[in-house]
Amino acid sequence: MSNRLKLKLYFITLLFIISLFFYKEHFAVSTGAIHKFGQIDIIITSICFGVIISATIYNLSLYLFTKHKIHLYYALAQISSLFFLINLDSLFIAPFDKIFGLKSIMLFNMSQILMLIFSILFLESFFKAYQIKNLKELTRVILYIALVDLLLTLIFSHSIVTTFIPIFVPIWLLLSEVVRLSSKRDFPFYFIITGWSAMLFTVAFEYTGLLALTGITFPFLHISIAFESIILSLAIAYKFKLLEEEKKAQQTLMLQQSRLAHMGEMISIIAHHWKQPLNFISFGLMNIKRQLKGNEKGLSGIEKINKQIQYMSSTIEDFRNFYNPTKEKDDFLISTACNKSIMIATNSLDLIDISLTCKVIKDFTLYGNRNEFQQVLLNIVNNAKDAFNSKEIEEAKIEIVIDRPIVTITDNAGGINKKNLDKIFTMYFSTKNNSDGIGLYVVKIIVERELKGEIEVETDSKGSSFILSFSKTLI
């Protein structure tokens, strides 16, 4: 347990001890309304009820269609919030005390505890994707305490724990730990924190009586819960949009790996059939070499043939390794991977009349999957080759420059149309006929997600430069 979490728990314990000295006030029962809403207040309150009901129906509908428990938990949290507000208004707010007529302290306390339980379950489900350490353990402790308090409420007709520790405290504890421990933050994350912070701030002011000191009677609590309903509904919708995009990205990578796997199987078959003839030729050359002793010209020819055989054997092995869809990661030298990519590109992409070179200014080592890095280079080179084929470019060339921690792939293929510059990394976008439009999308996914780097593109009328930066993951 971290020192910060210990400090927060000490604070909650101190709050509990202090509250015990005022137990009479906590267990006091109101005999009538202590606030009266005017016409505008009633209209605003009714609108807030409508927002909460709409959010409830919306999330229940989504749960029925998607079966995602996060929607169910949020809908139940909203129902509990609605029931809590109705009980609150029945006990303390005129004219709702006569409209609703619920004056049960037990129901009021139960609605609070249920609101806490379903809110915690919702937050746990929402932040599960952020892989926050020890979050589940913390939520389980809060849930067990809340369930015990719910049982005590059924027995004694009054809550015990939440009477002395208001429900916004454990929610604040959970959210503060999420903010402290989360390394991944996106727009839904900030939506959640903003919506809950606004509500907790209002509830805390209401609980401590600071709002009462202003003398203003206004449905602040209703507005804050309605605002939280809107913000959190947007957060859930946006989060599932991001998850859907991530799922599509994963499927695209799997498609790419499947293609490579099929190619790998074909090359393995070819390598198997090549191996025996190449060995036979090599043995034959050894026998011929023995009989050509003293014949320098003949021996020189034998040596050249041997080099070609070794090149063929090495080439087929390099292809087989490249198309092996392994996900193993290790340290690899960037220049070595670039040279392997150039060899594969030269032998597979038909780079006739295109100069493909690698320039090393300052080499560096990267931790990751070397095959995936080579896929990135080959996809970019293949795109440049297609651009050369569609245009008449004299002295076509592609240059890979390594300068720690950046790898730049530059071509002179005439550049990318500025109107397409923001779309080139989008899935299924392509300006070429008979293209599936996933090449550069896969490049972006591999660089940013698999290799933890960054990619950007610069272009002008002469050509384009793809800049890969690995400053964050550099060894």
Image: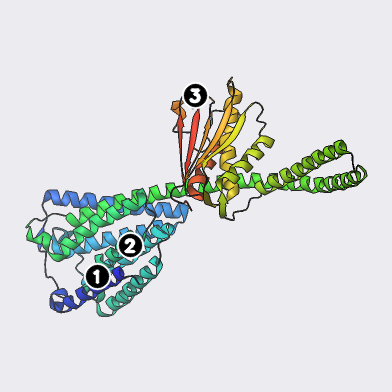
- Residue at image coords 74%, 48%: 268
Of residues 128 and 269, the one nearer the viewer is: 269
Residue 462's mark? Answer: 3
Q: Amino acid at mark 1?
A: Asn
Residue position marked by numbered label 1 in the rendering: 109
- In the picture shown, does residue 51 fall above or below 106? above
N-term-proximal mark, 2 vs 3? 2
Of residues 275 and 249, the one nearer the viewer is: 275
- Residue at image coords 23%, 72%: 11
Secondary structure of the residue carrying numbered label 3: loop
The way the protein has been coloured in the rendering is rainbow
Of residues 26 and 308, the one nearer the viewer is: 308
Residue 119's mark? Answer: 2
Q: Residue 308 lies in what quarter of the image?
A: top right
Image mark count: 3
Whether tag 1 and tag 2 are in contact, CB under 8 A, the answer is: no
Name the front one of labels 3 and 1. Answer: 3
Q: Residues within 10 Å of mark 2 (few under 14, many from 20)?
A: many
- Residue at image coords 30%, 50%: 231
Secondary structure of the residue carrying numbered label 1: helix
Horizontally, residue 388 falls left or right of residue 202, namely right
Q: Residues within 10 Å of mark 1 (few under 14, many from 20)?
A: many
Q: Amino acid at mark 3?
A: Lys
As drawn, which residue projects farthest toward the front?
A: 294
As drawn, which residue projects farthest toward the right?
A: 291
Q: Amino acid at mark 2?
A: Ser
